[in-house]
Image (spheres, helix red, strand yellow):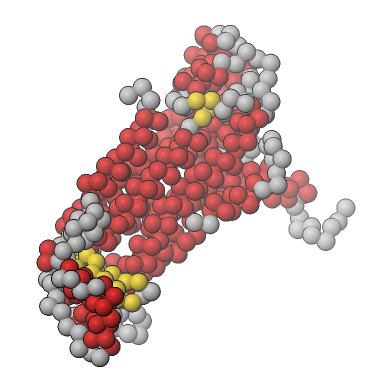
Amino acid sequence: MITLWDKGISAAEAVEDFTVGDDRVLDMKIAKHDVIASKAHAAMLAKIGLLTSEEEQILQSGLDEIAESIKNGSFVLEDEAEDIHSQVEILLTRKYGDVGKKLHSGRSRNDQVLVDIKLFLREEVLTFKDEILDLFNKLQALSNKYENVLMPGYTHAQVAMPSSFGLWFGAYAETLADDMVMVNAAYRIVNQNPLGSAAGYGNSFPLDRDHTTKLLGFDSLNYNSIAAQMSRGKSEKSVASAIAAVASTLNKFASDCCQYMCTNFKFISFPDSLTTGSSIMPHKKNPDVWEVMRAKTDRLQSIQNEIALLCTNMPHGYHRDLQLLKDILFPALDTLHKCLKMTMFMLDNISVNEHLMENPLFDPMFTVETVNEMVLSGVPFRDAYKKIGIMVREGKYAYDKPKSVESLHHSHKGSIGNLCNEEIKEKMMKAVREMNRTIRPEE
């Protein structure tokens, strides 16, 4: 039969091309995790008597060889293999015959991909933990370094009140501490073992799911086999929510940097090599890194919505729709890693303008200081406010501008004179300790 859409490819090939998409490429990201899970499954099968000790040793040896080929880059997905799970079984069966065929006993590709993705996401989240902590430490170091350097704070994009570079850098450090709580929550949701749920309804083999849970280092089981299958999508969305939290922090920081690099501000600067020029205007130093960072982190914040929409109105159990979760989430993971590393790189090269107070443009930010001084001397607040407001309007307001934070009297917790960086550090360390207890509950 000739069809209008026929381009010399069979219907079966067209369907395969449409349904597989980039899945084989994305499967390479979970290749080593498929081997890790298979080794645990083989050990469990031997424990319950579905493999002999000799058969288990053969499979473990074969899986170790595959793991080494993945590590050294020689592993490939052959054309006859539909996915990573099929490829591993093909290699074992090709080398060991019937012994290789026994490995799939008691599991389905459904719980295979579930456990592979959870192991992969668990590893990714732990990497994020380290990257976020590195950035936190960098921001705290900058906050401490510039704690006494004044800068204007803004509300409604207007000069408002005295701020400091210490307060600015420290704000993003504390926000990352909150983000770490989200990262920990994602880890806890991911760190549950679905292996043994098979296609979502278990099976009649006496599987020891506690054994694979222990071998794979999961905190607990997804006990209910249907619930285990329902964790597909929920696990990805929890990680996407953590990604969105971190991306939101990076996004606002990137926006600040774009503004503060502007020639109308000149609060911060970076070496010429980290900025770009104009094809026509020789004076330009464009904040391309921060602008691209802002765009990338905008996109990252949409990932959780995309995953939520993909999984909406889908009854329980496996559906091929779920394959596209890898298309959405895996590239996002790579993007966030790059954004965190680039932020660190840029902060290693940041220069702060320590002479902002010489600019008369920022004189109005001290009006509240004047009002407060009058109040402390006995003038009612509303009267002081009105008097200074009239002076500003008539162009008569002047203030002996301080040169540093130390000259002002901001002493309460969280103010420019009391950054509470040690308390913020403890907040982050508490989140890290909680995460470490989840990772290694025996400690």
In the image, residue 155 lies at what x, y percent?
A: 35, 72
216 relative to 197 in the view: left or right: left
The answer to whether residue 281 is visible is: yes
In the image, residue 351 lies at what x, y percent?
A: 20, 66
- Say which of 20 and 299 sits in front: 299
Measuring 60% from the left and 31% from the top, which residue is drawn there? 228
In this rendering, is residue 168 above or below 34? below
- Say which of 83 and 286 sits in front: 286
Q: How many marks?
A: 0
In this rendering, is residue 17 above or below 438? below
In the image, residue 120 lies at what x, y percent?
A: 48, 37
- Residue 320 figure quarter: top right
Measuring 63% from the left and 52% from the top, which residue is drawn there? 309
In the image, residue 112 lies at what x, y percent?
A: 59, 30
167 relative to 106 in the view: left or right: left
Q: What is the residue that sits farthest to the bottom in this orientation?
A: 394
The answer to whether residue 369 is visible is: no
In this rendering, is residue 29 above or below 417? above
Measuring 53% from the left and 16% from the top, which residue is drawn there? 44
Q: What is the residue that sits farthest to the right in this orientation?
A: 1
In this rendering, is residue 125 above or below 357? above
